Amino acid sequence: MNKKAKVTIDDVAQEAGVAKSTVSRIINNAPGVKPATRQKVNRVIEALGFTPNLMARSLKTKLRRQIALAIDDIRNPYYPEMAWAAEQVAKQNDYRLVLINHYGNPTEELAVIKEANDMHVDGIVLVSISHPKTLSAVMKKATVPVCLIGNYGEEMPGDAVGLNQSEGFLAMDHLIRIGRKRIAYAGGPTHLHRGARFAAYEKTLAENFMSIVPELVFNGDRLTIDTGIAAARYYHQLGEMPDAVFAANDLVAIGVIQGFLELGVRVPEDVAVIGIDDINWCTLIRPKVSSVSNLVGEMGRIAVELLLQRIDNGLAEPKRVQLEPRLIVRESTVKSY
Amino acid sequence: MNKKAKVTIDDVAQEAGVAKSTVSRIINNAPGVKPATRQKVNRVIEALGFTPNLMARSLKTKLRRQIALAIDDIRNPYYPEMAWAAEQVAKQNDYRLVLINHYGNPTEELAVIKEANDMHVDGIVLVSISHPKTLSAVMKKATVPVCLIGNYGEEMPGDAVGLNQSEGFLAMDHLIRIGRKRIAYAGGPTHLHRGARFAAYEKTLAENFMSIVPELVFNGDRLTIDTGIAAARYYHQLGEMPDAVFAANDLVAIGVIQGFLELGVRVPEDVAVIGIDDINWCTLIRPKVSSVSNLVGEMGRIAVELLLQRIDNGLAEPKRVQLEPRLIVRESTVKSY
DNA sequence: CTGTTAGCGCATTCAG
DNA sequence: CTGAATGCGCTAACAG
């Protein structure tokens, strides 16, 4: 049941009484074949159930029609959306998508680039956790095009699609626009690059002539639900509660909301809460979580497009695409009627 | 930067002053090579940075060292866990994982099997939505091994790993064991195969001499959060509320919980709620949702193992693996202290 | 427009 | 233990 000796291009040629090169032209839609011949051969192909051997073809053309999507862990809520979009575009271009989880393990991550050739792939879309310096060095040795997802400077070889860093401002502006005066920040250790979001917090407050109140800043050690819950409890026992919470990501926001609900604090009436990333979980809980979308699907889509473009066209300057995050207002900041 | 003319086995042979067949033996760990030669050649391989061309190798061996995971949509909450586990096992066996979303589109789904050969894959793990009859017919024509995920009878060719249908009973038994007397059912249209869960509901009640109260059965049209919310509202306006809800899946359970919370009903004190599937969202909301795990990760892992086994060993009887669902008790049924 | 020829890089007989 | 020769199935000149 999986043994039928595969029919080859020679079989078709023989059966149709033409040369294999003619068959080759036909299956590749190459021009310069008499319609009659084309028809005849096509009929034979149909009859014999011939399908070309991609290995042999690849051996010749060096094209495998496969790309890799290398991320740290598909179980991370951001990635399914990205993987889905990436596979879409790949499929539309008759490419296959190889999924690789590198677990944020630098060795494994960089190995993906180094071993691209051994992987049957023509290119890689990579979400990297490595240090840019290291990454840059490895990228230079890449044997296939790599499209990075993330923000990288000019010195980084290869294409990249990232977000401009306005998520924090979009979130903060929203809270201010809906009239919140006492805005808290719930996030992780500020020394990480999430610091950009905290910076937006400080900057926005300053620009609006609001003083930054140290006791309203809660820093958990990781950006998780539990950190959010802890934050809610912390705010609750404060002399004066905040009337809004800017959470560094959605998981924290969800935790904050759940925490508040347990304590009888109403969201958004008493406290408005907003997160960042717009993971699909945001619509799961009530109130639905306001957030800032970082367009992961869009990033995946564009990354693959850039990659395929480069695979086809070869060289040209590295490209940079910057996406603009988008504010998504839901029930955790504005009461719906 | 991606142009370095790939070094071939010939280069190595020449450089090392041996024949390519010798090099071939060495890179394949074949026996019958003098250690000295082996060492020498290995050094050259290292020096030249040679890595074998998998296309050429595959052309010869017919093995691509890739398998496909074909599911309907990676964005569906069950699949990331499965994909992750599958990729794990594949990687451990030096196989790559090609991700295919077939969108529950029967044509596309069956095409995956038919075109397996064109896909550079040695086998397929398939989550099918198609009718067993149709599927069976296509499976018979498969050119590579296929391992199904789901419950299939003997007449279905190929291996399969599924769950026995005890989820419903596990959930119901739990509710009864914690002393609930007035148990409601919230699900979708009973004519779908989810009906097995509803059957468990009825059967368990009967076995425990509890009468089935029609007004406690809520059937939404789809198994979604919104259905759950609607169910909660429905129960709430009843003369007598249920003291437990058995939801046909976790999404419904989450909706029920959110709905109750909005109405000021306490979970689990007033009403215990349990779902099925144990998707990771269960630990996201408070109270955390009790559920029955259908071991998607485990299924993915085993499916790949079966598949690789068959790829290596060829024939033998189709195998069937039945997993036992597992009750996961969390806060939505039992108050935690 | 079509046929002939020559490899792509490797694994694998078969001799030595 | 090692080398020379053959071909996997296909594409791409090059002739005709």
Image: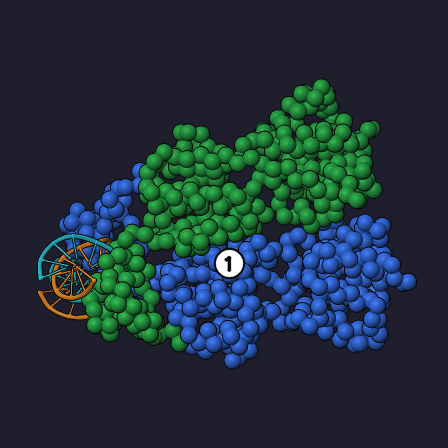
Chain colours: A blue, B green, C cyan, D orange
Q: In the visual, does A16 lie left or right of B162? A: left
**Vertical placement of residue B209 versus A9, above or below:** above
What residue would you read off at disc 1?
A: A101
**Vertical placement of residue A18 versus C16, above or below:** above
**Vertical placement of residue A117 versus B303, above or below:** below
Q: Secondary structure at mark 1?
A: strand
Crowding around mark 1 (Cα neighbors within 10 Å: few <14, some 14 to 19, many 20+) is many
Residue drawn at x 81%, y 33% is: B237
Relative image position of residue B100 (x, y in whole percent)? 46, 50
The chain containing the residue under callout 1 comes to: A
Q: What is the total number of numbered labels drawn onto the structure image?
A: 1
- Is residue A134 visible to the viewer in this orientation of the structure? yes
Relative image position of residue B64 (x, y in whole percent)? 34, 54
**Vertical placement of residue B327 versus A33, above or below:** above
Residue farthest toward the right in the current orientation of the protein: A239
- Is residue A85 visible to the viewer in this orientation of the structure? no
Q: In the visual, does A216 lie left or right of B201? A: right
Residue drawn at x 83%, y 42% is: B264
Residue drawn at x 19%, y 55% is: A20
Residue drawn at x 81%, y 62% is: A244
Which quadrant of the rendered structure holds the C terminus of chain B?
top right
Residue farthest toward the bottom in the current orientation of the protein: A155
Q: In the visual, does B267 lie left or right of A320? A: right
Question: Which image quadrant for residue B334?
Answer: top right
Q: Label 1 sits on what residue type? A: Asn
Which quadrant of the rendered structure holds the N terminus of chain B?
bottom left
Considering depth in this image, is A311 or B148 the residue closer to the camera?
B148
Relative image position of residue B94 (x, y in whole percent)? 40, 55
Relative image position of residue A54 (x, y in whole percent)? 31, 55
